[in-house]
Structures are given as structure tokens and as C-alpha cells.
Amino acid sequence: MRDRKGFTLIELLIVVVIIGILAAIAIPKFSATREKAYFAAMKSDLKNLASQQEIYYSDAYSYSTAATDLAFTNSQGVNVTIASTSTTDGWAATATHAALAATEGCAIYYGAHAAVSVGTATPSSPGEMACTS
């Protein structure tokens, strides 16, 4: 009998099946982790916006609807929209991410401004941030 070296077809097929099972488990976990990162970026941007609004208010005694007035920049992929403010009593903003659906995001408001919402996320009190996920 010859001395054969190498793997049989059955052994190779078993390895391919095991790799397929591991991939089927890992890919959904990776997607969930990526979505959490998107929401973390949106929350971080809204917190930074709140800080910038308070700095602007201490100088001008009013809130701004323009990110350029606040020297505020979004994270990559995040779109922050500041709701129009008609008073000096508060402001509101929403954040969405380009990689998520338009109905997924976070919202926040401060002061006497009316609450804004993104999808099903509506903050219940001033200063509270609400996200869809």
C-alpha cells in the first residue's frame, strides 16, 4: 500500500461545514455591534451639541440653529438637525446615521422647546436623550 499524505474529501467537507456554521453565528453578532457603534456616535454628537449650545448661550444669551455658529462638527455618517428655535428658552435636535433607516436615530431637547422625535423615539423630559434602539 502506498503512503498517502493529505486530507480526504470528507475531512475537507467537514472543515468547510464547520467554518460555515461559525460564520453564520458571527455575522449577525458583528452587525449588531456595528449598529451599537452607530447609535453611540449619534449619542456622542448630541451630547457634544448640548455642550456647544450651552457655551453659545453663555456668550449670546440665545440658542443657535446653525452648527457653524456653534463650531460643531458631526461624526462621519451622522446627520444632526437642530430644530428651529423661536425663543431663548430652549432648543431641540435629532441625529440620524447614513447607514441606518431614516426612522432610526436619537432625539434630545432642552428648556421649554417642544420635544422632537425620530421614528418612535421621543424624549419625555428636557435633557433626556431618546433613541429608537
Image: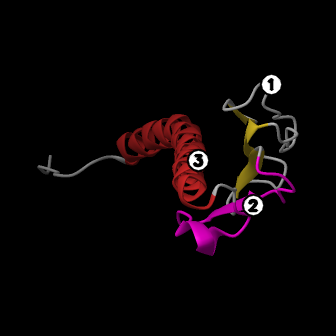
Q: Which residue is mark 1?
A: 124
Which residue appears at 83% of the width and 42% of the height?
113
Q: Which residue is mark 3?
A: 50
Asked if the magenta segment contains residue 87, the reply would be yes
Magenta highlight: main SS: loop
Residue 62, image x and y in percent?
Answer: 69, 56
Q: Nearer the viewer, residue 66 or 75?
A: 66
Q: Residue furthest left?
A: 3
Residue type at mark 3? Answer: Ala
Residue type at mark 2? Answer: Thr
Q: Secondary structure at mark 2?
A: strand
Residue span colored magenta: 64-88
In this rendering, the answer to whether 33 lies above or below 126 is below
Q: Which residue is mark 2?
A: 81
Q: Would you call the spot at circle 1 few (<14 residues within 10 Å), some (14-19), or many (20 or more)?
A: few
Residue 92, image x and y in percent?
Answer: 76, 48
Q: Residue furthest top?
A: 124
Q: Earlier in the sequence, mark 1 or mark 2?
A: 2
Residue type at mark 1? Answer: Ser
In the drawing, does residue 51 fall left or right of residue 111?
left
Separation of marks 2 and 3 at Cα, in angstroms? 12 Å
Q: Residue furthest bottom?
A: 68
Residue 84, image x and y in percent?
Answer: 84, 60
Residue 31 sits in which quadrant? top right
3 or 1: mark nearer the eye? 3
Residue 129 sits in which quadrant? top right
Which residue appears at 60% of the width and 54% of the height?
57
Q: Earlier in the sequence, mark 2 or mark 3?
A: 3
Asked if the magenta segment contains residue 42, the reply would be no
In this rendering, the answer to whether 86 lies above or below 9 is below
Q: Nearer the viewer, residue 74 or 82?
A: 82
Separation of marks 1 and 2 at Cα, in angstroms? 19 Å
